Amino acid sequence: MKWIEVNSYDEMSKVAANIFTKQLQEKPTSILGLATGGSPVGMYEELVKRQQAGQVSFKDVITFNLDEYVGLDRKSPASYWTFMHEQLFNHVDIKEENIHLPNGKAEDLAEECVAYDARIKEAGGIDLQLLGIGVNGHIGFNEPGTPFESLTNIVELTESTRTENAIYFDDPKNVPTHAITMGIQSIMNAKEIVLIAFGEKKLEAIERLKSGIINEDFPASQLLNHQNVTVIYGGTK
Ligand code: PGA
């Protein structure tokens, strides 16, 4: 695992954007794994600027997002589909048909889980996967206790995660109870992974990851078994 300590959120965003820029310049047909949340907003903003300046193009890029809420219409303001369009997709030259998020409104959710992993495989597998980390060590919506071999699956959100995500909803009661998420193994199948975390709130999770102990109680720890992970982190105590 490669560790890069940064002094600001802005620096984290630029360092992460550099890794994505290099990937897109070397392989314009890259398959990217993307994430939602507060952590990647700055990196997406940076990539939009670089695309508009002609340094990168998403013209032949295919994306797969980690997760989506169950039961939320994709056009809902709080859906991850909307988040990704607002933060990135609406501002770059990506083709709509190359954008993938799990369908949280699928009639057969179990079938959608299997189909999502199959779509990633058919596309050729993820070249570069972006991750945030939850204060409890979750990656995607894989909460503590999730088996490391999990593939895309339906999860019940923990109260801590629902509380953290309530900021995106008018009323905390409207935070869905379930989500569809790529599993830990689906994430581990990516050829390269970048995990970003900035701020005091995240330090404990970063310290736990640094301790090197691999345990299903701390989902991100499985990343220690991956050959190509960069963690970009920082923040003050
Ligand atoms: P955040 O969430 O980027 O909004 O902090 C990350 C996560 O919980 O995975």
Image (cartoon, grey):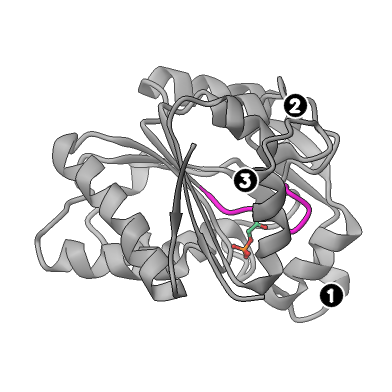
User: Few, some or many C-alpha atoms within 10 Å of disc 1 (few <14, some 14-19, many ≥20)?
Assistant: some
Amino acid type, callout 1:
Pro
Q: Nearer the viewer, residue 34 or 139?
A: 139
Give how far across and how far down residue 198 sits, in percent: 55, 67
Q: Residue furthest bottom?
A: 170
93, above or below 182, in the image: below
Give how far across and how far down residue 7 sits, in percent: 44, 73
Q: Going by the image, does 183 lie left or right of 189?
A: right
Q: Is residue 133 magenta?
A: yes
Tell which tag, 2 or 1, sits nearer the viewer. 1
Tell me the tag on residue 208: none
Tell me the tag on residue 67: 3
Q: Nearer the viewer, residue 33 or 171?
A: 33
Give how far across and how far down residue 11 sits, in percent: 37, 70
Q: CA distance from mark 2 to mark 1?
A: 27 Å
Figure quadrant of the C terminus: bottom right
The reply to whether the C-beta atoms of the residues labelled 3 and 2 are less than 8 Å apart is: no
Amino acid type, callout 2:
Ala
Tell which tag, 3 or 2, sits nearer the viewer. 3
According to the image, label 2 marks what residue? 110
According to the image, label 1 marks what residue? 172
Q: Secondary structure at mark 2?
A: helix
- Residue 56 seen anywhere in this rendered image of the structure: yes
Q: Going by the image, does 202 lie left or right of 33?
A: right
User: Few, some or many C-alpha atoms within 10 Å of disc 2 (few <14, some 14-19, many ≥20)?
Assistant: few
User: Few, some or many C-alpha atoms within 10 Å of disc 3 (few <14, some 14-19, many ≥20)?
Assistant: many
Amino acid type, callout 3:
Asp
17, above or below 224, in the image: below
